[in-house]
Image (cartoon, rainbow, N blue to C red):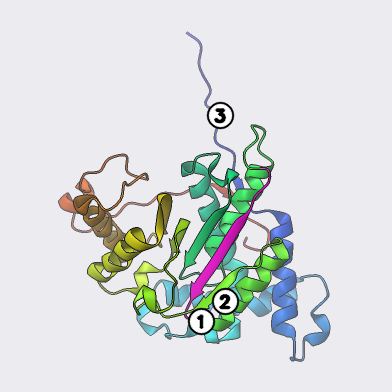
Amino acid sequence: MHRVEKTPPPLLTFPQVVEDTLKAYVKQAYYAGTRKADFATRNFTSGDLRFFAKGVAELNRYFTAERAERPRNYFNRKELRSGYLLYFLPVNALKIQQILQSNLPRDFFAQPRRVLDLGSGPGTGSIGTLLYLQTMRHAPSGGARSLRVELTLVDHNQPILKDGEQLIKRLSDIKPKIIVADLHRPLNSFLPRARYDLIIVANTLNEFSETEKQLQLIRRLLQHYLTDEGYLLIMEPALRLPTRQLMELRDRIAQDKIAWIAAPCLHQQNCPMLADHPRDWCHMYWDWQRPKLIA
């Protein structure tokens, strides 16, 4: 018998050009008008890292241990916006890229597509989509070579949307459509009745306190805004309470048959873990090569 060595999957990597773009943008945008304005065009240094890391640490507390203390409009504070751009955006955009790569048909973007990034923050889902498209451009087997994509970003915070708009323009030739809106309002009060081929709802549903409210939003998206062959991507933090809510939402979608669930579960039945274990929750992970900035 011959022993077969399994080759581990390659580590996910965040493109250096995107990391450099983020670092340059943050310095230019957030040092302007301060005593550090003269440093805005210089290379990113350990001093810059120490300066912006304070916002990362505070956001991390708000997102985990101190969720109840998080201000409603926390992105109005520029130190929290800059911290999100440098730390949370790369991590989450890479997750979006990998989910799309694992689930979309390879020819999905071979024709013009419309993407809705709902609760977008700085366009994290949209930037993850751009990372995916860049991967497809260079795929050995072909994939989408000439790409026409329309991006619509929706969030309640205008400053973080402005950041997303500027970053997307720096990373591509796409000028995204920006909509400032509160997702607790009816969708048709701010979102035209258009159909989208890909709808991304990333790290957003946990802002709703009840599964029923989450379901109402998802039902409206599926019924009125997603094309018949389109994909809805929902991604939430792998914390216990948000994940168990998402597991409940998945059960309701399956029970009501309002969509076909493609992943990660390969069935359309109720979640057995949710029914049998009152505290357990599931999540998935990928190994990745952390950028030096993140490390």
Determine the CA span between mark 1 and mark 2: 6 Å
Q: Residue 84 carries which label?
A: none
Mark earlier in primary sequence (1, 3)? 3
What residue does disc 2 label? 161
What is the magenta range? 145-156
Residue under pointer 3: 7
Measuring from the top left, give residue 270's x and y in whole percent.
Answer: 20, 48
Q: What is the crowding at mark 3: few (fewer than 14 residues within 10 Å), some, or many (at least 20)? A: few
Tag 1: residue type? Answer: Asn
Q: Looking at the image, which is closer to me, 136 or 203?
A: 136
Looking at the image, is mark 2 or mark 3 earlier in the sequence?
3
Tag 1 near tag 2, CB within 8 Å: yes
* Residue at the (25%, 54%) spot, across then down: 253
Task: Quarter of the image for the C terminus: give it.
Answer: bottom right
Callout 3 secondary element: loop
Name the amino acid, label 2. Answer: Leu
Instruction: Name the secondary structure under disc 1.
Output: loop
Q: Which of marks 2 and 3 is in front?
A: 2
Q: Tag 2, which secondary structure? A: helix
The image shows residue 283 at horizontal and vertical percentages of 37, 52
- Residue at image point 46% right, 43% down: 103
In reply to whether residue 166 is colored magenta, the answer given is no
In this view of the protein, can residue 66 be seen by the observer? no
